[in-house]
Image: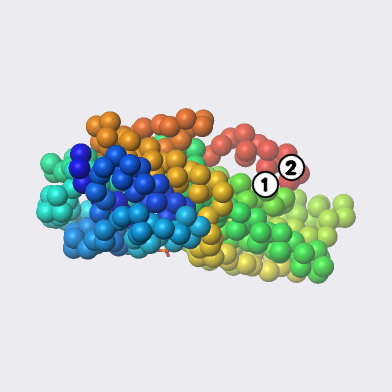
Amino acid sequence: MKRIGILTSGGDAPGMNACIRAAVRAALANNLTVVGIRRGYTGLIATDTVPLDRAAIRNIIHQGGTILETSRSPDLYTREGRLRVAEAIGKMGLDGVILIGGDGTFHGASLVAADTDTAPLVGVPGSIDNDVYGTDYCIGFDTAANCAVEAIDRIRDTARSHERLFFLEVMGRTAGFLALESGIAGGAEELIIPEEETSIAPMSERIRKGFDIGKKSAIVVVAEAKTPGVSFQIAGEVKKHLDLDSRVVILGHLQRGGPPTLRDRVLGSSLGVAAVEALLEGRSECMVGEVGGALAYTPLEETWKKKKPLNENLRRIFSILSD
Ligand code: F6P
């Protein structure tokens, strides 16, 4: 192992830069040369690279986004695209590649590994959605969840001043992790997540009862699920059951930006080092994550094929506290 590549792919997540920095430092400490691959798989196919030396990773630990830039590339879903990826890795003379991203990134990587004779690939989970199987937390989730909590706190001030009902829509695609944890931390009254059915009439009744017993505001945290903007429709349906002044806030990409929290910097740093060590130990086609505080290696194929379950205890806690 002499020369490795690092790329970020899929949605950017705060803490990716901390991870790049850690991987580069760990690699340099082991006398490896590091090549930064720009713009995810799109840049990989185009062999669009930057050298990653000590100077390149200076002063980035606190920056959101990714210095390597990123993309969502459909190329991996054709055999021709996968061959081009393997060919580019060969052309760049890489003995291993670290891929920081989410389930889509690992789906692509496992297809490449299955279809070609590529150099070892090691994944690091980076996604605000936190929906990657094989790790308790993905890089970026904590920062995004804290952003949602701050939004809930701010909305609470105006909601209680006007005795209003708010629907706050958070990201997460088909997973409710962001909604659940920010809902608990923000003291939300209701949660609408893709993992479960929500009946509008009983939910509206619970909100009404809350106001009857003296509440001055109610916040429903809505996971965007497959239809970003769905909160407007939900608010419309609730209106049929509940005569309350309501507003909708869609947090959107605000959640993806900003400086990473301590947790995301530490997770990014720890997994960045672990990814380099995994390559040096001869591991391949796996993702390095953290489960119960310990490093865990999961075959890339499992990371996207298996559904990561919501933490049932946290779900139970939300129900108790929002009652
Ligand atoms: O996967 C991360 C994520 O932020 C999802 O929560 C969201 O649905 C999606 O990316 C948005 O993607 P884009 O930035 O391409 O609009």
> Does the rendering let one see residue 228?
yes
> Does the rendering let one see residue 221?
no
Label pair 1/2, CB-CB below 8 angstroms: yes
**Where residue 208 sits: x, y (%)?**
79, 56
Name the residue carrying label 1.
184
Q: Earlier in the sequence, mark 1 or mark 2?
A: 1
> Of helix, strand and loop, which one carries label 1?
helix
Q: Give the color scheme: rainbow, by chain, secondary structure or one colour.
A: rainbow
Q: Quadrant of ligand 1?
A: bottom left
Point 44% across, 51% down: residue: 18
Point 16% across, 43% down: residue: 118
Q: Quadrant of residue 52?
A: bottom left
Please name whichever residue, 214 or 212, is drawn nearer the observer in this view of the structure: 214
Please name whichever residue, 281 or 187, is drawn nearer the observer in this view of the structure: 281
> Of helix, strand and loop, which one carries label 2?
helix
**Where residue 238 sits: x, y (%)?**
67, 61
Point 28% across, 31% down: residue: 281
Please give the count of numbered marks on the rendered protein.
Answer: 2
Q: Which label sits in the foreground, 1 or 2?
A: 1
Q: Quadrant of the C terminus?
A: top right
Name the residue carrying label 2.
321
Q: As displayed, is residue 78 above or below residue 277?
A: below
